[in-house]
Image (cartoon, rainbow, N blue to C red):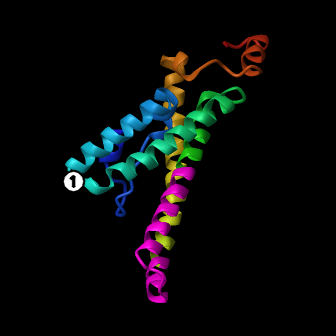
Amino acid sequence: MLAAMSIPLGPFEYHLTLAGPIGVLLGGAGSFQVAFIVSTILALMGHGGLTVIGLNALILGSAAVIARGAFPFLRHRLAPGPSLAIASGAGQAVAGLLWLVIVTVALRGSGATTAAERTHLAPVAAVAIPLWALGIVAEGAVAWGLARFLARVRPELLGPAPDDVAPRAVAEGGAA
């Protein structure tokens, strides 16, 4: 997570978070701890700010917890790659909505509700929402690859195989 978040992608300083895979592998409590430590280290390195460490940890931890909750449900029905990709995407989607709610509440609390201030928010939303969607796809793609790798080298980290896939593969002469 630290390495992924240290590398900005593109001109808008977007970065992968790997919150979904971290959530699946470490669980909820471990994910919040990792998110806090990563946010703190990055803030001390000048990436982010000291005043938003808690907010960043909350949003990253939320994405991880959502992914952790969705993964077992998906894993009983799908292969590891799609399961982790969808779970990570769901976590990123919820984290993005949480961020949007927090920013909206903060702006309303600061009095940024005039027509001129709302007009300035429209271009930000026009850039942020497509980046958010692209980020969900990018996180899912990286999670897919990571799950495929883990399924080959340490499949026990991803839980049991789907109930209906393993017997069918054995019956068809394939490896389970």
For label 1, the crowd category at 10 Å Cα-Cα, with few meaning under 14, some 14 to 19 and many 20 or more, is few
Is 165 positioned to the left or the right of 116 in the image? right
What's the magenta region? Answer: 93-122
Q: Is residue 2 above or below residue 131?
A: above
**Residue 101, can we see it?**
yes
Viewer-proximal residue, 142 or 20?
Answer: 20
Instruction: Write the residue at 51% across / 58% down.
Output: 132
- For mark 1, what is the residue? 46
Amino acid marked by disc 1: Gly
Is 153 positioned to the left or the right of 52 in the image? right
Residue 10 screen position, x and y as percent: 36, 59
Instruction: Name the magenta segment's main secondary structure.
Output: helix
- Is 79 included in the stretch rendered in magenta? no
Instruction: Write the residue at 42% across / 30% down.
Output: 30
The residue lying furthest to the left in this view is 45
- Is 104 included in the stretch rendered in magenta? yes
Q: Is residue 171 above or below residue 94?
A: above
| Quadrant for the N terminus in the image | top left
Residue 97 screen position, x and y as percent: 55, 57
The part of the image, by quadrant, that contains residue 165 is top right
Badge 1 marks a residue whose secondary structure is loop
Residue 39 screen position, x and y as percent: 32, 45
| Quadrant for the C terminus in the image | top right
